[in-house]
Image: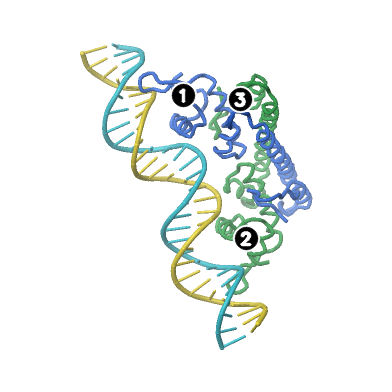
Chain colours: A blue, B green, C yellow, D cyan
DNA sequence: ATACAACTTCAAGTCAACTTGAGGTCAAGC
DNA sequence: GCTTGACCTCAAGTTGACTTGAAGTTGTAT
C-alpha cells in the first residue's frame, strides 16, 4: 500500500505517518520509486498507537512497548505497563461514576458534592512510590 | 494555605498552580499581601485535574467539566464526558489484556500475535461518527 | 507524450502545557 | 532592623507532537 491508502484506512494524515516513521514507531517495507510502500500490518500497529495516544501515553512510551529491547522481550515492562493501565482504568472508572453522579446531583457546585468527593478519594488513593509523573494528593 | 503548601500537598509545582489559576482551572481565595491564599478544597479540584490529565484530557476539556455554563449545569455535557470515558475505559481494558497476553506469548513479534490482534479489533471497533479526534481503523 | 495528482524531502511554523529567569516584594526569625 | 527565603509578575524559553510550505519527482490516466 502507498502512504495515501494507509492514511485513508488508518485515519492518520500522511504527514503524521511520515513523522511516525521518522520516530521509528512504524516502518515502511520499501520504496516504489520515491514512494514508501507499507505492509498492511502497519494498520494494526497504528491501531495500537491510536489506542495508546488516546490513553494519554506519549509516543516514546508507546515506542517502548513495541521495543524488542535486546534479544529478549521485556515481559516485565509489558506487565508493568499493564499494571499502569490497570490503575488508570480504576481512576477513570471512578471519574466516570463521579461525572454521572454530578450530572444528576442537585448540589449547586457539583464538584463539592460529598459523593463525588468520596469517589475521588478512592480514585486518587495514595499510589506514590518514588518519582511519579502525575501529581497526587497527600 | 499558601501556594507552597498546596504545591507540597498536591504534587504540582507552584509554577503550574499559577498557570492553572491564570487558565481559571483553580481559584485562589484571596491574597495575604502579595501572596495567594488557597482554600483547602483546591486540593480536590487538583485531584480531578490530575485524573483528567492522566486520562488524556486537555486542560480545556477539564475546564469544561468544571464550568457552570450559564445558570444551569450542563448535565448533558457531563454525561457525554462520562460516555467518552466509558469508551476509553473499554479501550484501555482491551489494551491491558493485550499487553498481558503479549507478555507471556511465545510469538516473537508479539504485536503480530493473533490473540492480541483480536483483542485490538474489539477495542478499535468502528466508532466513527462525524469528526472524531482519534484515528480509527476502517 | 503530457498532464497532474500524489508522492518526496527538509526546514520552519504552530499549539498546548508548562518551566525558567530576571527583577522585585514581603513576613518572620535572628 | 536586617537578612533570607518564599512568594510575586511578566516575558521568554522548552518540549512533544504534529502541520505547513516550498521546491522537486513520478506513477498513471488521457
* Picture quarter with the C terminus of chain B: top right
Mark 2 falls on what kind of element?
loop
Residue indicated by mark 3: B111
Q: Where residue A23 appears, x then y in whole percent?
A: 48, 34
Residue at (67%, 64%) from the top-left corner? B5
Mark 1 falls on what kind of element?
loop
Asked if disc 2 and disc 3 are in contact, CB closer than 8 Å, the reply is no
Asked if disc 1 and disc 3 are in contact, CB closer than 8 Å, the reply is no
Whether discs 2 and 3 lie on one chain: the answer is yes
Query: Which residue sits furthest front?
Result: A71
Q: Where residue A89 appears, x then y in whole percent?
A: 71, 38
Q: How many marks?
A: 3
Residue at (38%, 18%) from the top-left corner? A32
Name the side, left or right, on which A20 lies relative to D7: left
Against B57, is A65 above or below? above
Q: Where residue B28 appears, x then y in whole percent?
A: 63, 63
Residue at (62%, 47%) from the top-left corner? B62
Q: Where residue B42 appears, x then y in whole percent?
A: 68, 58
Q: Chain of mark 2?
A: B
Amino acid at each position: 500500500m502507498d502512504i495515501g491508502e494507509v492514511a485513508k484506512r488508518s485515519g492518520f494524515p500522511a504527514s503524521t505517518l511520515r513523522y511516525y516513521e521518522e520516530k521509528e514507531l512504524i516502518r515502511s517495507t520499501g520504496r516504489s520509486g520515491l514512494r514508501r510502500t507499507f505492509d498492511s500490518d502497519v494498520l494494526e500497529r497504528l491501531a495500537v498507537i491510536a489506542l495508546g495516544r488516546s490513553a494519554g501515553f506519549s509516543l516514546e512510551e508507546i515506542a517502548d512497548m513495541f521495543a524488542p529491547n535486546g534479544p529478549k522481550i521485556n515481559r516485565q515492562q509489558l506487565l508493568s505497563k499493564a499494571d499502569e493501565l490497570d490503575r488508570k482504568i480504576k481512576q477513570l472508572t471512578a471519574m466516570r461514576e463521579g461525572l454521572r453522579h454530578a450530572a444528576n446531583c442537585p448540589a449547586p457546585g457539583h464538584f463539592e458534592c460529598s459523593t463525588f468527593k468520596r469517589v475521588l478519594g478512592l480514585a486518587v488513593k495514595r499510589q506514590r512510590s518514588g518519582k511519579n509523573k502525575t501529581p497526587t494528593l497527600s
